[in-house]
Image: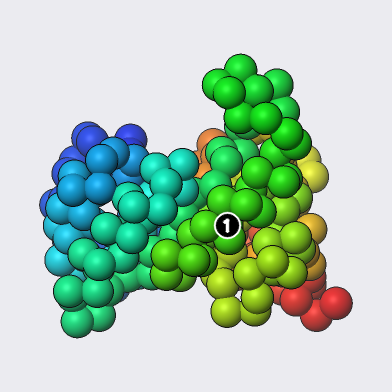
Amino acid sequence: MVKVGNQLFTAEGPSVVRSLARMGFGIFLDLKFHDIPNTVAHGVASACHLPGVRLLTLHTLGAAEMMAAARRAADLVKHPPKLLGVTLLTSHTADSIRSVGIAGPPAARVVKLARLAKSVGLDGVVSSAHEVRAIRRACGPKMLIVVPGIRPADSASDDQARIATPGAAIRAGADYLVIGRPITAARDPRDAVDRIAAEIAAARLM
């Protein structure tokens, strides 16, 4: 799959999704919907009608009613994408979530949000690799876990706080990895992809 996030979608709109679908790509539409339930439901409905979309994100901090509205909207489509609840961003730290009124360690908050997402019928969550094992214990084997903040050992952390190598995330039990700047900012993106793919393959054999 290729990820279409806010930056690309804002620049090019739905046409870029259609173009990528025509090329044969599956699409991770990472728009992180977060609004009142009615607005999110309509946004999800529109996204579900775009071709090739396999994964679609919304913020779990939008709360149960918003996520449930998204679920209902997606279920009106014959083959809806998997709905993923973004828990806490991988740029967040204990200090940053405390500054916006969220108490406690990030890991505990992430697991609570993952349970909430499961309770309203979401297919999975987005979290850092640090919380994958705890989410799996709390939500079971069928819950998809998508992990961003992936940084190979020789990469800069950039603005990410809770990061992991590709191998570590796979060994923790991630279903999908989101890998952006280690590839897009690499001097040789193809070589970066090949090295990351090899690390993932090796981790799967362990």
Residue at which label 1 appears: 114
Q: State the image coordinates of residue 57 (x, y, percent, origin top left).
A: 39, 53
- Give the x, y percent position of residue 202: 79, 72
Is residue 152 in sight in this rendering?
Answer: no
Residue 34: % across, % down:
34, 40
If the image is split into quadrants, where does the C terminus sit? bottom right
Residue type, numbered disc 1: Ala
Vertical comparison of 51 with 178: above or below: below
Q: Residue at x 72, y 53 (%)?
A: 131
Does 130 sit above or below residue 187? Answer: below
Please state if 127 lies on the left or on the right of 15 as rendered. Answer: right
Q: Position of residue 53 (x, y in %)?
A: 29, 66
Q: Secondary structure at mark 1?
A: helix
Of residue 10 and residue 141, the one placed in the foreground of this image is 141
Residue at x 18% of width, y 48% of height: 38
- Determine whether, in the image, residue 182 is placed left or right of residue 1: right
Q: Is residue 144 above or below residue 205?
A: above
Q: Residue at x 15, y 66 (%)?
A: 49
Callout 1: few (<14), some (14-19), or many (20+) C-alpha neighbours within 10 Å?
Answer: many
In front: 60, or 79?
60
* Left/right of residue 147 with respect to residue 201 in the rendered view: left
Q: Quadrant of the N terminus?
A: bottom left
Residue 91 can be seen, yes or no: yes
Residue under the point 57% across and 41% down: 88
In front: 58, or 54?
58
